[in-house]
Every structure is written in C-alpha cells, then in structure tokens.
Amino acid sequence: IAALTTNGVAALTTNQIVALTTTQVAALSTAGIVALTTAQVAALETRDVAALTTTQVRALETTDLAALSTVQVGALSTTGIAALTTAGVAALTTAQIEALTTAQVVALTTAGVVALTTAQVAALETRDVAVLRTNQVAALSTASVAALTTTQVAALSTAGVAALTTAGVAALTTAQVAALTSTQATALTTAGIAALTTAQVAALETGDLAALRTSQIAA
C-alpha cells in the first residue's frame, strides 16, 4: 500500500477502500492521502478513520474533511483532531461540529478555536462548551463570543468565564449577560467587569449584582 503511486491510490474503487485493513490505511503515504477523492474518504471505515496518523489527518484536504460523515468525524482520535490545520477546522460542517465528542473539542488547538466560524461555534453542544479549556475560551473571537446562544453561555464553566478577554466580555449581548448565573457573574475578572457597557450592567440579574465581589463593584 505504501508503495502505491498517487495515481494508483486514486484508482482504487470505494469497495477496495472499504476492504482496506487499518494497518493498510495507516501505511498510506502523505501523498497517497492527498490523492484520495472525497468519495474514497467517505468510504473509509470508522475503524480506519480512528487509525489515521496525525500526519495523515493533517494531509486531508478541506473537501475531504467536509465529506466525512458525522460518524467518521466522531471516530477521529483526539491527536487527530489536534492535528487538524486551521483550514481543516474551518472546513468542518456544523453537523460535524455537533458530532464532536467532548474529548475531541478539548483537543482542539487554540489556533483551531480561532479558526472556528460563528456558525460552528453556535453548533457546539452545551456539554462541549462546558469543557472548553481556559485558553480555548480566551482564543474565541469577539464574533464567536457574540454567536454563543444563551444556553451555551450558561454552560460555560466559571474558569471559562474568568478566561474571557475584556474584548470578549464587551462582545456579550445583553441577552447573554442576562443568561449568566450568579456564580458565573462573580467569576468575571475585575478587568472584565470594567469592560461591561452600561447596557450590559443593566442586563445583569439582581441576584448577579448582589453576588458581585467588592473588588468587582469597585471596578
């Protein structure tokens, strides 16, 4: 398999792709992976997708990634997810984003998080939002923060809320601010509190205001 030319790989039928063992798939060269058609990639068994090396995953073209089924995407290893290029992350469909496991979401690099479109961010399951690493939350663009649903905002961990940049806090809509729990509100940094607009402050629930720390009020 490793000796196949790119033309040889491209000539394989989808039935032949299905018949490949995980060992054979893992033996495909980078050039061989690039040579795969979208139909061939879509024909890969989930066990084969799970066995792809980080180099192979990185070599997948954006059209090939978009052709993966949600089941195939869910089979990608966490190291494979971490190996995705920024273009690769941006190529994932919203259905594929929804199919990611929490472990896969946590595996996204900060560069990968930056590459997420607003539609992709909005497609994240609440369970995935809840496990975002602090550096992932900090990497969210202001547009991505504003794209979060109120349910997603309420799912952010306190560490995640504390990790929001001042620009990220300022990007929150009044509806998102109103969705914050008292625990989340108290997790905002003093810089974050200072970044709130008058409209955002007015949107804070009375319970949230009552829970604010003295250092936050002073900000």
Image (tube, rainbow, N blue to C red):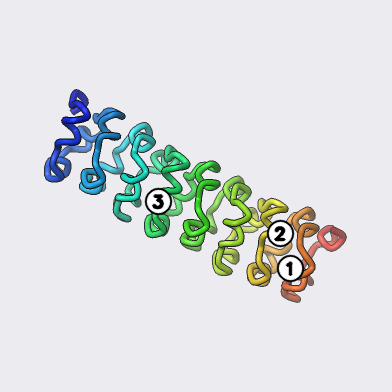
Q: As drawn, which residue projects farthest toward the bottom?
A: 206
Q: In which quarter of the image is the N terminus?
A: top left
Q: In this view, does 99 lie above or below 112?
A: below
Q: Is residue 169 visible?
A: yes
Local SS, label 1: helix
> Mark 3 or mark 1: which comes first in sequence?
3
Q: What residue type is labelled 3?
A: Leu
Q: In which quarter of the image is residue 199?
A: bottom right
Q: Which of 170 and 72 is in front in this view?
A: 170
Q: Can residue 45 be seen in this view?
A: no
The dot on residue 170 is 2
Between disc 2 and disc 3, whose residue precedes?
Answer: 3
Q: Name the residue under label 3.
A: 92
> Number of callouts in the render?
3
Residue 47 location in percent, x, y?
A: 25, 44
Q: Is disc 3 placed on a helix, strand or loop?
A: loop
Per the model, the C-alpha gap separating discs 2 and 3 is 28 Å
Residue at x 47% of width, y 56% of height:
120
Q: Outermost residue toward the top?
A: 3
Tell me what residue is drawn at x 51 percent, y 57 percent: 121
Task: Measure the C-alpha gap from mark 1 to mark 2.
Answer: 8 Å
Amino acid of disc 2? Ala
Can you give x and y, in whole percent of width and height, for residue 130 in the image? 54, 58
Tag 2 secondary structure: helix
Q: Mark 1 points at which residue?
A: 200
Q: Where residue 29 sits: x, y (%)?
A: 27, 28
- Residues 120 and 152: in front is 120
